[in-house]
């Protein structure tokens, strides 16, 4: 009797689930001919260009907005909404180098048909600098007169020297000369936004259909935590994109992303770290892989005020005692490049031979440690290496621990921390030794040196303070001759590589899978999250 | 008069008798042997193994099971077999000791609430409601910040929130049982509250309690892994079954055995406790006393 | 019953207040705050933000403000999701999580309870051993592993189901099963244990001796008495399923509320943490209340003095 009872239950249940599974089998984003599907790997916390800070925010904003200037695929500056890049030659930069005049094109339109005017830029930049906005990148624009005061809450918006002289002219005055200012004006915090829309809708303006931009795509749908849909902007002033639609999914799990790619739900996917070997060995997937450097360096960051890292010889010993080549070749299967210097390949200023004295040499490392006063690792204070808790960081931390023990006989303890606590810890310089990574915002050493190693700089968490370095960077920042400027920065980098407030570990290389139907993809080192997301206008799909 | 015959009957205590019966239950004995063997192996294997648990071999990364490495190697070339048994130390400790904390807190609270009823029950259960909803992650992060992240924090952190289910379970059982005739009889015979609870109510409620405890073991093991990631408890490179599964997850496409072996270990431990627990419940069943 | 319910409601409100206070306090004591990011913000900007969100006020004032707003039904704004209201965020994700949780719950009890009963009635049979095997299996495989295995089988190999997201029923099946696996195993074992306990009682023997059919014995006597522990366990399981699992929702990309609490804590999003915690507190208090009421229904001897 019980058996019958159970049988009925199970039969009902199985039938029910079968029936349910066939009802409303909604076609998952029916793939039309020109639709690109990529994974954004999470819900962006904001897509307001002036507030954007992380790669996923910028990736979204860059499909829908364009600024005065931009970058070519060779990472050179180009004029976008501006008619030309301001130079002293064309009068765009004043004699003293402190006033920039941008002449805008008159044919640039918003996606609702309105014309893009210089006032839009003025409004947007001032909003970005407003203390209420709390834009992460506001400090990048502190060279503008009145910007720092306004952002800090002591100044007014009117005192910020960004003025729309007329509909097609924008004038910006700087506190001091800054040769890299045009590059900063190519970045997303300077992109235009519509005053009337932001005023009317407040913080909800980033929801479609209010997310009005001047870029090649329009955000037509945003299902929170699920996906975003972009469609080609019919009112786009420039060359229309070939794609009809882009879908940004929000799959947070790396393995699931790969599964979705294999199931033809995505046209591109990251190769999860740890699966490189399998993917490379897979005859079907291997030809679909692409790899390229993304202008980022990862390093071990010291706090040079904490023993034993206050001794340069100790830092040098450690730098020489890490077998980066083995890590990249064996653990990462060759993805990435061992780094002994700071500025990555693809950036002006990258020096491939710099730091060669730190190539792995266990004997030399031990020797240096002895010279530092800690023969064979004896006498060292306790060392704690802190990092944010992710599986990949763990591997790196454990690798480091193994290297220190094997090559230098130093025992370090590992301290994973959750991301918020880790950020707070490092920003307050409480760490001894931590994991650190930096990615280029724009392709210039300006972005890589003064802000990270300058005395008291916002992103300097190494407590490194070198007046000679500061002086060199100041000179370089004001040097108008580009060759001389780069030379000065090269010297500055040499200082860093010699003083070692950080021990470089590797330059990151992206390793992705791309379906053969995706054509025309242009990858650059400045790509935000997904390969080619700077140039989706030229991508098209071609089914085999 | 049969008095002489009755007093010649040997005196069996509930628990003594239970132990004898337990011994006769083959599955339960098997379970006990497995647990003890795991504990012993966790000490012995890392001592006799040719590999250290944290010994990295960058030339033998992500290799499957072979002669040299019985269960393969992980992402840094470490021997999985050695790590699995070394990790048993933490996982066994966490899995088992947390249950002690759960029992130590949950049993008295649940029993008291159930037996006393009324206001006591209400107050205790509302306290339980608060603990159910307690933002344990926040407390754990705070504990870590103040008291550091030692291994004992793990037992506390996991145990202090896990006991609520047991309390509710025991209370429910006792609420139902205490109305029963045999309890009324025991009370009539002059049994006090604690005596009745220990001698009659608890042994009769054991079944579901044992299930909760056995399920609590893998739960505790996985909770420990999650905590290890935010810096509480064991630090890398010390392995535990939970952290091995979590770390291995990233390589699941290429090296599924990294997840498989620790998961099997967890399963075996849980199975052993299931058999032992079932046997214990059978052994303590007053109905089957000789 | 009505008096009891009203009294309970009062206590639920008190519980919520206590939970709110504890959470609020812990939140502000924990190191790190909502403005801690890798690229440190300028100190004046942080000051400004704190002023904007009232974080510079003394603790009791902040808590008072929060409670005041709460009484008006305002759960505040999320600090990280750029001023989106917490209520809005919860209401957006809740239907999806609740649907998924509800379906998973149904699966769990539709599989768990019959399986547990069968295992108890045929102790030490094949069914019993199978139930032990499967319950151990699903308890020792963490949710994310089970999830990826299901995806590997049904999406990647068989191309039958999508890997995740929210849509028609083919999006719900896998996460529902993955979510239901452990509760089903647990419910099955608890049912079995409880039934075994009851089956051994004298009154069952009496009922059988009286000549009652097995069916009557089962339904009228065994089941009702065995339900107490099952109820105790399924109540919180339902609350847990309805408020969502961070792991399953992450693996299957379900845009629900499961991740809210954990994400909120990670980002120190005070608004979200409070909202998610209070929501869960309410759900669990409600669930325990319903369970207590059902105790009385199932076993009329239970009284709450």
Image: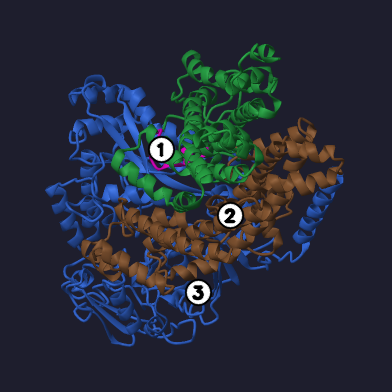
Q: Chain of mark 2?
A: C
Residue at disc 1, secondary structure: helix
- Gap between marks 2 and 1, in whole Å? 29 Å
- Gap between marks 1 and 3, in whole Å? 56 Å
> Residue at 69% across / 46% down in the picture?
C225
Chain A on-screen colour: blue
Task: Work out whether A200 lies above or below C52.
Answer: below
Q: Which chain is brown?
A: C
Query: Which disc number belongs to residue B156?
Result: 1
- Of discs 1 and 3, which sits in the foreground? 1
Q: Chain of mark 3?
A: A
> Residue at 22% across / 20% down in the picture?
A375
Q: Which residues are magenta?
A: B222-235
Residue denoted by label 3: A216
Chain B on-screen colour: green
Residue denoted by label 2: C292
């Amino acid at each position: 009797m019980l058996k019958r009872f159970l049988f009925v239950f199970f039969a009902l249940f199985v039938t029910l689930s079968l029936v349910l599974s066939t009802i409303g089998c909604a076609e998952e984003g029916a793939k039309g001919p020109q639709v690109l599907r990529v994974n954004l790997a999470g819900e962006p916390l904001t897509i307001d260009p002036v507030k954007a800070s992380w790669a996923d925010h910028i990736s979204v904003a860059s499909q829908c907005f364009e600024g005065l200037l931009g970058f070519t695929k060779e990472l050179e500056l180009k004029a976008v909404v501006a008619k030309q890049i301001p130079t002293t030659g064309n009068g765009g930069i004043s004699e003293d180098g402190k006033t920039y005049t941008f002449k805008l094109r008159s044919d640039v339109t918003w996606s609702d048909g309105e014309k893009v005017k210089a006032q839009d830029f003025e409004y947007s930049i001032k909003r970005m600098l407003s203390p209420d906005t709390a834009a992460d990148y506001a400090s990048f624009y502190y060279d503008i007169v009145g910007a720092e005061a306004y952002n800090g809450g002591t100044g007014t918006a009117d005192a910020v020297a960004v003025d729309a002289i007329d509909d097609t002219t924008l004038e910006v005055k700087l506190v001091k000369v800054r040769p890299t200012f045009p590059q900063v004006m190519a970045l997303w915090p300077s992109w235009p936004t519509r005053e009337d829309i932001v005023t009317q809708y407040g913080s909800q303006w980033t929801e479609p259909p209010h997310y009005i931009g001047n870029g090649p795509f329009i955000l037509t749908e945003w299902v929170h935590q699920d996906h975003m849909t972009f469609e080609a902007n019919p009112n786009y002033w420039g060359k229309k994109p070939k794609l009809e639609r882009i879908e940004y999914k929000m799959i947070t799990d790396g393995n699931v992303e790969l599964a979705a790619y294999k199931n033809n739900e995505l046209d591109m996917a990251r190769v999860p770290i740890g699966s490189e070997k399998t993917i490379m060995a897979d005859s079907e997937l291997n030809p679909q892989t692409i790899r390229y450097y993304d202008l980022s360096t990862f390093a071990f960051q010291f706090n040079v005020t904490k023993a034993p890292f206050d001794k340069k010889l100790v830092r040098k010993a450690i730098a020489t005692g890490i077998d980066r080549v083995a890590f990249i070749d064996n653990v990462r299967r060759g993805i990435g490049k061992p780094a002994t210097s700071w500025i990555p390949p693809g950036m002006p200023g990258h020096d491939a031979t710099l730091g060669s004295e730190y190539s792995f040499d266990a004997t030399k490392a031990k020797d240096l440690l002895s010279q530092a006063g800690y023969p064979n690792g004896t006498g060292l204070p306790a060392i704690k290496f802190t990092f944010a808790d992710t599986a990949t960081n763990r591997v790196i931390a454990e690798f480091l621990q193994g290297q220190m023990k094997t090559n230098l006989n130093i025992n370090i303890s590992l301290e994973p921390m959750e991301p918020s606590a880790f950020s707070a810890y490092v920003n307050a310089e409480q760490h001894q030794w931590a994991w650190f990574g930096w990615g280029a915002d724009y392709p210039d050493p300006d972005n890589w040196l003064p802000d990270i190693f300058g005395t008291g700089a916002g992103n300097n968490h190494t407590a490194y303070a070198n007046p000679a370095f500061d002086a060199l960077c100041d000179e370089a920042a004001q040097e108008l001759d580009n060759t001389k400027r780069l030379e000065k920065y090269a010297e500055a980098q040499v200082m860093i590589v010699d003083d070692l407030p950080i021990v470089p570990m590797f330059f990151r290389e992206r390793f992705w899978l791309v379906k053969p139907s995706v054509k025309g993809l242009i990858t650059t080192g400045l790509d935000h999250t997904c390969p080619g997301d700077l140039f989706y206008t030229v991508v098209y799909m071609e089914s085999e | 008069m049969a008095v002489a015959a009755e007093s010649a009957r040997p005196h069996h205590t509930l628990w003594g008798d239970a132990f004898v019966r337990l011994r006769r239950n083959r599955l339960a004995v098997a379970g006990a042997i497995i647990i003890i063997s795991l504990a012993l192996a966790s000490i012995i294997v890392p001592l006799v193994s040719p590999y250290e648990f944290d010994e990295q071999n960058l030339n033998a990364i992500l290799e499957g099971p072979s002669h040299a490495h019985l269960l393969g190697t992980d992402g840094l070339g470490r021997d999985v077999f050695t790590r699995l048994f070394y990790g048993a130390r933490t996982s066994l400790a966490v899995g088992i000791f947390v249950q002690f904390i759960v029992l130590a807190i949950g049993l008295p609270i649940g029993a008291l609430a159930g037996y006393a009823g009324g206001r006591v029950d209400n107050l205790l259960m509302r306290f339980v409601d608060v603990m159910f909803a307690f933002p344990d992650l926040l407390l754990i992060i705070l504990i870590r910040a103040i008291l550091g992240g030692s291994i004992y924090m793990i037992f506390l952190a996991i145990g202090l929130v896990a006991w609520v289910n047991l309390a509710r379970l025991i209370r429910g059982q006792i609420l139902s049982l205490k109305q029963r005739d045999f309890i009324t009889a025991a009370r009539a015979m002059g049994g006090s509250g604690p005596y009745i609870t220990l001698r009659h109510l608890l042994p009769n409620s054991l079944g579901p309690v044992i299930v909760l405890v056995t399920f609590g073991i893998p739960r505790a093991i996985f909770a420990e892994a999650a905590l290890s990631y935010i810096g509480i408890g064991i630090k890398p490179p010390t392995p535990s079954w939970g952290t091995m599964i979590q770390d291995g997850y990233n390589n699941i496409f290429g090296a599924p055995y990294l997840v498989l072996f620790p998961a099997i270990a967890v399963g075996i431990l849980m199975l052993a406790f299931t058999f032992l627990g079932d046997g214990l419940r059978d052994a303590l069943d007053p109905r089957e006393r000789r | 019953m009505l008096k009891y319910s009203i009294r309970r409601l009062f206590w639920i409100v008190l519980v919520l207040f206590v939970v709110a206070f504890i959470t609020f306090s812990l939140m502000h004591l924990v190191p790190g705050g909502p403005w801690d990011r890798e690229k440190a913000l300028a100190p004046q900007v942080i000051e400004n933000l704190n002023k904007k969100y009232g974080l510079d006020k003394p603790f009791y004032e902040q808590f008072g403000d929060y409670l005041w707003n709460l009484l008006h039904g305002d759960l505040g704004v999320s600090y990280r999701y750029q001023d989106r209201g917490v209520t809005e965020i919860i209401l957006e994700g809740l239907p999806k999580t609740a649907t998924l949780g509800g379906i998973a719950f149904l699966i769990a009890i539709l599989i768990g309870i019959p399986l547990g009963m069968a295992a108890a009635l045929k102790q030490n049979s094949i069914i019993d051993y199978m139930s032990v095997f499967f319950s151990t299996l699903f308890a020792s495989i963490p949710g994310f592993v089970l999830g990826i295995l299901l995806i590997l089988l049904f999406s990647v190999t068989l191309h039958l189901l999508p890997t995740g997201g929210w849509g028609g029923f083919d999006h719900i099946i896998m996460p529902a099963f993955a979510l239901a696996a452990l509760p089903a195993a647990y419910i099955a074992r608890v049912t079995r244990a409880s039934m075994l306990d009851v089956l051994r009682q004298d009154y069952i023997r009496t009922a059988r001796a009286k000549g009652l059919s097995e069916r009557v014995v089962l339904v009228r006597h065994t089941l009702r008495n065995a339900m107490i522990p099952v109820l105790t366990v399924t109540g919180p399981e339902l609350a847990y399923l309805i408020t969502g699992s961070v792991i399953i929702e992450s693996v299957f990309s379900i845009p629900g509320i499961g991740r809210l609490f954990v994400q909120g804590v990670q980002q120190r999003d005070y608004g979200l943490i409070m909202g998610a915690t209070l929501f869960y507190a309410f759900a669990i208090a409600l669930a325990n209340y319903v369970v207590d009421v059902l105790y009385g229904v199932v076993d009329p001897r239970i009284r709450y003095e």
